[in-house]
Amino acid sequence: MTSLRTRAVHAGRDDLVDLGLHAVPIDLSTTYPSRDSRDEAARLDEAAIGVQLGARPVYGRLGNPTVSRFEAAVADLEHCASAVAFASGMAALSACLLAAVAAGRRHVVAVRPLYGTTDHLLASGLLGTEVTWSTPEGVGDAVRPGTGLVIVESPANPTMSEVDLDALAGRCGDAALVVDNTFATPVLQRPVEFGARIVLHSATKFLGGHGDVMGGIVACDEEFTRTLRQIRFATGGVLHPLAGYLLLRGLATLPVRVAAASATAAELASRLAAHPSVRRVYRPGFGGPLLSFDVLGDPHAVIGSVRLVSPAVSLGSVDTLIQHPASISHHIMSAEDRRDAGISDQLLRVSVGLEHVDDLWADLDQALAGSLVGRAG
Ligand SMILES: *Cc1c(COP(=O)(O)O)cnc(C)c1O
């Protein structure tokens, strides 16, 4: 089988040579003219049951050829039959929740910690779902006949705790296991290999990789993608074709970006663990570009003092980002829910980019030096 690194470069572009093209064409059409309205009607009947319309999708909300290339590439990398792209990661998650509600299975079992807005969407029940929070071990007791989805992130955000997906999949009964794979990326983990039915990404992060495009994508089997296409068509959370182009371009370098950033993150983690201002460092067991750490002093002082590292929420960009989860990414959760999820007020999360490790260390070290100033004792 061709390696992931090779597929990342070629997936979604396999037909370009036959088209006489090198770069992927961007199709900005909102409508697709046709002199054959009987054919159009037949195609709309297909779209109504979620069939992908291919080259001339009648109308832009039904599909887009540039976006379809990105979808095909992510399905390939995640070892799934198919994928459906959305305007953002939250639009992608919303479509999964609406699919469960529409199927009469509005009960969702979710494992904390989750991305802050995911937690909020489930806790608020805004889309008509009813959530039961569970530990990974408790999922078997939490699912019931009407449970539509089991939702988990591994490694978790921002604590980097890992869930045994294989064991979890065995506890889901006939509920579909949804794994948010934004942090791991298909380079480090392909959840369907562990029994997940649905793989979700905020493509805004590592897939795009340059901090300049928002998107979301769900990779799964063909049956569930048909439902998702119907929901996307009816609710309109489509990915813009330019975003589809940029996300596909980002995929080509995903494996090398993840490998380089992971090596730097490993080195930073060991230096941080030995730093007198750091209490504890968290990293996923399989590595990766993310790390978080509890500081002894003032976490806000660290955010205010970095000069090379970008003090910004989000992750997966070419530049290194640092943020304070209790103030930003997980601020929308109640303080009590944060505590239950293991997110301390001292925690800082770093998404390591492609800078040289020594330059990053010099910046973090000087920012940490200031964080203990003014602390009693
Ligand atoms: C960012 C993020 C999301 C939401 O994605 P958007 O593209 O911001 O809508 C969901 N899950 C995780 C793990 C994320 O990091």
Image (cartoon, rainbow, N blue to C red):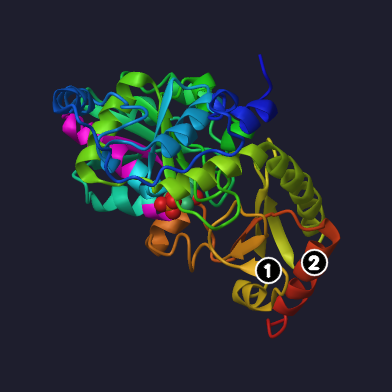
Name the residue located 54 percent from the left edge and 58 percent from the top edge: 212
Q: Nearer the viewer, residue 136 or 241?
A: 241
Where residue 107 appears, x then y in whole percent?
Answer: 23, 35
List the residue tagged with mark 2: 276
**Residue 47's quadrant in the figure?**
top left
Tell me if residue 268 is in the magenta stretch.
no
Q: Amino acid at mark 2?
A: Pro
Magenta-highlighted residues: 93-117
Residue in front for this viewpoint, 195 or 200: 200
x and y, in percent, of residue 45 in the image = 16, 24
Q: Residue at x 22, y 51 (%)?
A: 126
Question: What residue is drawn where x is 66% and y is 14%?
Answer: 1
Q: Does 127 sit above or below residue 35?
A: below
Work out which quarter of the rendered image holds the C terminus and state it.
bottom right
User: Which callout, 2 or 1, points at the residue further toward the start of the chain?
Assistant: 2
Residue that extends furthest to the top in the rendered view of this protein? 1
Secondary structure at badge 2 equals loop
Q: Is residue 315 visible?
A: yes
Question: Mark 2–mark 1 contact, CB under 8 Å?
Answer: yes
> Distance from label 2 to label 1 (Cα)?
8 Å
Q: Is residue 178 left or right of residue 167?
A: left
Residue sitting nearer the eye, 84 or 105: 84
Image height check: is 328 above or below 96?
Answer: below
